[in-house]
Image (cartoon, coloured by chain):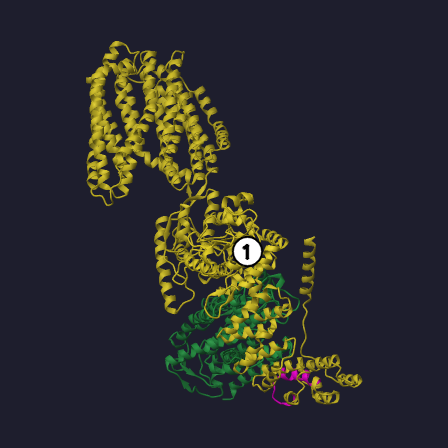
Chain colours: A yellow, B green
Amino acid sequence: MKKLTTKVLKGGAVLTSGTLLSRVLGFVREILAAAFFGGGRLYDAFVIAFSVPALFRRILGEEMFERAFMPPFERLRSQGQASTARRLVIRIFFVLGLVLLVLTAVLFFFMPTLVHFLAPGLSPDTAREAVLLGKQVLPFLTLISFSTLTGAVLLFSDRKVVYSTAPAVMNVVIILALIAFHRHLGITALIIAYLSGAAAFFLFQLPVFFRVMKNLKEDKTANGEDPLNHSLKESSRIFVTALANKGVEIVDRMVASLVGSGAISSLWYSFRIIHLPFAIMGLAISRSIAPELSRLRGSRNYRDFGNVIHLGVDTNLFLLVPVTIFFMIFSREVITLFYFRGAFTLTAVDRTSLAFFYYALAILPMGLIALLNRIFSAFENNRAPMRVAVFGACLNVFLDFILYQTPLKQGGIALATAISQAVQVLFLFAALGRYPIRIRLSRILATVGQLLFALLFFVPILILGKFWMPETLHFFTLFFWLGGIGAIAFIFYGIVAYGFLRSRRTEKMKVVLTGGGTGGHVYPSLSIYQILLDKNRIYQVRYWGIHGRAEEEIVPRTNIPLEFVPAAPIAGGSPAAKLRSAVTIFRGTMIAMGKLLRFRPHLVVAAGGYVSAPVVFGAYLLKPFLKLKIVIDEQNLVPGLLNKTASLMADAVLVNFRESAYFMWSNRCVYTGYPVRPDYLKPGKPKSDLRKELDIPENAFLVVVSGGSMGARAINCCMADAMDRLSEMDNLFIVHSIGMSQTSDYHALDDTVKRLAASMDELFDKTRIEAHRKDGTIFYRGSTYFHDIYRYQQAADLLICRAGAGALAEAMALAKPTLLIPKRGLPGDHQELNAISIAEQGAMDVLFEEADTKSNVDRIPIPLFLERIDQLMKNEEYRKTLGESAARLFFRHSADRIYATIDSVIKQKEIEGETQIVEPRFVQFQRTFDNLIRFLDHNASKKNNLYVRFYNIKVHEYLASNQPLTVNKGIKLIGSLKRVDLYPFIYENFDDFHGFQKRNALAALTKADQFQVPFKNLVEKGLRDSYFETRREAVSLFNCFHTHLADDEIHKMILNLLKKRIESFEVKAEAIGAAVRILDQNAFLKQMEPVLFARNIRYREALLDAIRDGLNLNRFENREIVRNFLKRMLITTSQFQPSFTVRQRFLTTIKKLEETDHD
Amino acid sequence: MIKLLVDALMGNGMDIGVLRLVNYLSFRVIMGMVTSLLFALAFGFRFIVFLYRKKLRDVSGDISAINAFGKRGIPTGGGLLVMLSVTFSTLLWGDLTNRFTIVLIVGFLYLGFVGFVDDFQKVRFKSSLSGLSQLGKTILLLLFILPFAVFLISGLNPVPEPLRTAIFIPFLKNPVLNLSTGFYIAFVVFAVFSIVNAVNITDGLDGLLGGTAILTIGVYMIFAYIIGNAVYANYLLFPFVAGTGEIAVFGAILIGALFGFLWFNTYPAEVFLGDTGSLAVGGAIAMMAFLTKQELLFPIVGGLFVFEIFTSLLQQKIGGRLGRRILHRAPFHHEMTHRGIAEPKVVVRLIIVSILLALIALLSLKVR
């Protein structure tokens, strides 16, 4: 897991390690300077003289180059316009050189004025000193400016090492020079040291800089606009901001010069110390957060944006507040420790520690300002910071002039800085309100609370330490005391604070989404992404799909980077095609592995479809090497082969239907329902408003037709062909999403438009895809794809859609009455059976497609379609119940369940897999077809039963098959459904049937309600058949219609069967039943004499059944004789039916318990 | 293990009279049988509860599928109990340095494992249709059968060279057929595969496989005992193969375990053998047949198994192709229940048939 906190801190540390070194060295430099030159008049002069070059360095280096000039440079470079980039740098060089030349000249001539202006309170000889030093230090300005520019170029050319070590080099040179020359040259040594340092700085970077410039040779792409102008404009704002921010120091000095001798240097020295923690922490935080912010800004991930800001603020508070407190409590000790030696006198210590005490207050605001400025620049808004900075500067100056007159003196100036900085922070926060970022005050207050709590472990230690600490000026004693107290306090504080910071750590993931082919596979993975995003768990995301399918259309709209991995479906096609697919999958797996190694995701979300298979395979193979988890989302009730295989590799399988768990090979299925798009869960606007927005008549009956993202051919054809009839329905308004399908086989839009034009003539507007009635009112609007179809659906009175998982869930989420038109001929007929199972619960209406015998395209019977529409339109009560039932069925906690599951997977916790696996009813029916037949036998009369309706359509398909077993099913269905119209199929083909089919055909006919003449022929044929089961069924058919078949020939044949020595007992047993219908009492009993003692009890059972039948049919004149006859029967048995008593009681008890459960 | 221990003790001069018993084959045969039987009896019920808890039940644990008349939800994989018991007892009483013992126990456990995979898949994937595919099962079986065939013809086999690829024909004194190596391997593969499948298919009624397998194994045990005993072998004109007696020990142990299993498995069954047991037992029978060089005795002693698979193939392969049934039901034990004979009755009748076949097979010991 990426821990953002650690990442930020670590990133900052790495990035600023060089800077840190240079800061520390710079601090050493200051310590040395303090020791050599003290904190008095002389150093005041130097600080004033040095102000201008220092100011320029800060403004140019930290602000302008890096923020204004370098971004376009970077952009050009990465876009391949190397030569333009190079030209840009050179031009900046020239402009800079020109500006510097003019500036140097001006400064040279106006130095006295400047010094007077900067330090009005300076004594005349100090001022003279300052002028002299100022003139001497002027080359430093040029050198440092150029080296800042080269440094910036290096930074943005990924030469960070050189960039960050160069300042350190400079400081080393300065320190060495100071040590070497301070004895002999006095203050001039300082000038020499700085100049040689700056030269070293410049020279150190130069070789690498030239190499970089040399590499920037040729433009690879065409040149666009000139970037320099834009940069100059942008830079002016940054310049002003920086000037306002940094210039305050100068103003401070100006005012300080009024305070008295040594005040300027006291501010300078104390500021140097303040700068250290601020530089290390504040700068580090904002530097490493800034790229994060730009990235988030790019992805418009505002929620995360807010979180990053909060994190930055929290870190600032937790790190800088204790430092502030430490500095304030030990202000004098710190100053003594750092500066009290050599020329630095005790009075200087007093002066400096006063300023330091108040400056410490500014640490936190400074850190926050740095952070907030970064946020604004991430939004490419430099104006607000500029205004705030200017305002802050004014405030600062104003306060300076008030506060320096108070006893605080230079402390007052420091305080003014702190106050104005704090005010700026508030203003900047207020200015953030313009952006859609949620900064929660409550969270900041919570942080403050936690901080105060943590400080309880910090401040008392410091106070105690201060109390016990001996009064000393000795360096080592001070060092150990301060260090010891600080270390103890910070350790205690650190433990508590770390606990707090850790508690808010969000574990963020890099996520790969995959799956696609159709919108039905793309949307679920996007929904899961959205769920994770809402819970703030996304760090980075990629979508891997294939070319030319729905994902290419949908994903780019979401700002998720889309990449392609080859994939192919394995089902169907010739062996050669299968082999090709296998090769493609293999290739895809390899590519996916490469991508996975590069991206190193923590989570792979595969939303089904063959598209996701290579990625899942690759991820599984890499699982031992990368810490990743695989989650599969299966929307369909019946998963395909690839998904079943992939499920074995997944850490969790999210299923949309409970029954899917039955098919999945994995045991880690979790029922989550379908993650519908959040749009569908939001309460919609009032219908009337929506309709107004969508330009739909308010009182019209709105039907929204959608066949999925790619479109449904049968639905489109049906709509188009029925359009003229639909136009006659009053008050109807149709919105039709035609679909994006553009295969060679079917171009959805063209075909539909053609058909519409054919059926509507001039009433159809081809360009706008609108149709109107004869009176001119528009009643039909089509489009290849409505991106906001949910709004139409929310406004609709009736939805028409496919029975795919997504469409079903969306319709249920909207709680709208829906007419499902399931797609025919899918694996296991799952759409149709889906539709049935939902319609069985009274939640939707269904219309089945029919196979077209002429073409292989399915069609919807238009009269039935119109009838359904008409019925739904008129019956408002029915629509209402449909909608209510749909809402009841919808699983609303999908998002929570999905999140919980993924979270458990990531945390390697046990997931609650689906354990109660229910074999879906239709699977029962399909697996043992006889179950279905039995069901249909009982329900055939219910014409509205969905299974009856469905199989009434299906039977044609079965009969048309060339698979004997499938035809067999068809024959069984003919019987169960009592399809008299299909009996001729049996009559005509009976001779060609093989054994099972003949048997089933005869069995099917026994279910007929009425005798048909051809039965007689079939019975005769069946009795003659060589297959015993056919003979049995023939006798059984005779038994059913024995009155119609009272034919001597048949009677004789059946009785012959009884007499045959070698005959299946099944046939004979059935024939015993027939005998009672054929023979009179005496003949029957005579014939049955041997059966009384038959070894096989099936005969005896058959005899008993036959006698009961005979009684029902009144075949016996004298019951007494029959009774006496039967009394002789052998009633020993080899068969019995067990009843397991424990099970019996178990079941009754369970049933009882379940009853009380419902009460 | 006990044998090894005793050997070690005696080799070091600890010649105690009671210990010498262990070196008698008959003692170990009986002790092995008793041990495995007692093991199975002692842990049987606890094991059934364990299987039930682990949801290793026949097809599904769904309450709605249970009725008072059927057998759904009864724990399957009882073969594990047999395997455990056999392993325990063999480790105790078997001669672990004997190659026959090693081959038998390894093959037995491997086939049990294959069966367990099958059972486990059926249970895990919630349907009797979702076990190992025919192809997968075949491959897994071949992974054992091929090495076994190679073992039979290799120098590792204690059977002397000319006899290795020879085939005895029951009721004939001398081996008649001497196959070439390739043919012999093909024959082994075919025969072992068929035997395993035949035994597997017979496992359909409560106690049926247990009862019939005990008889078959018993016959082979007697053959092994005789061949491994120089005196008897000489007397009955069998080629003496040293160490074959250990096959008898293994057979006895398996018989004991099966008796212990039958205790629970007899009608109405509290646990099913499952593929775990039927494949392991089938494999053991096949291995014993080949290791004792009595391959062609199997059609007699295991005539019931042969008949069962014959009826099953007839119905499935030929009937399926013709599009009609040839028998009313297949395999044969289902035909019998279909004819109105209750399950326990069918089992007892078939066991009686097996006894008959076993007696005929034993006749071939002397009538040659």
Q: Is residue A964 above or below residue A544?
A: below
Residue on which the image places disc 1: A914
Between A20 and A99, the one nearer to me in the picture: A99
Residue furthest to the top in view is A124
Name the side, left or right, on which A115 lies relative to A958: left
Place of residue B184 in the rendered image (x, y in percent of width and height, measured from the top left):
40, 80
Give the camera-side residue of A54 and A485: A54
Q: Residue furthest front?
A: A775
Chain of the residue under label 1: A
Q: Is residue B260 visible?
A: no
In this rendering, position of residue A218 left or right of residue A993: left
* Quarter where residue A863 is shown: bottom right
A1152 versus B237 height, above or below? above
Would residue B90 be counted in the magenta stretch? Answer: no
Q: Nearer the viewer, residue A1138 or A1024?
A: A1024
Q: Residues within 10 Å of mark 1 (few under 14, many from 20)?
A: many
Q: Position of residue A861 (x, y in %)?
A: 53, 64
Please indicate whether residue B274 sits to the left or right of residue A467 in the image.
right
Q: Which residues are magenta?
A: A1058-1076
Residue A1058 sits above or below residue A179 on the image: below
Compared with B355, A879 (above or below) is above
- Judged left or right of residue A516, residue A1099 is right
The quadrant holding residue A1056 is bottom right
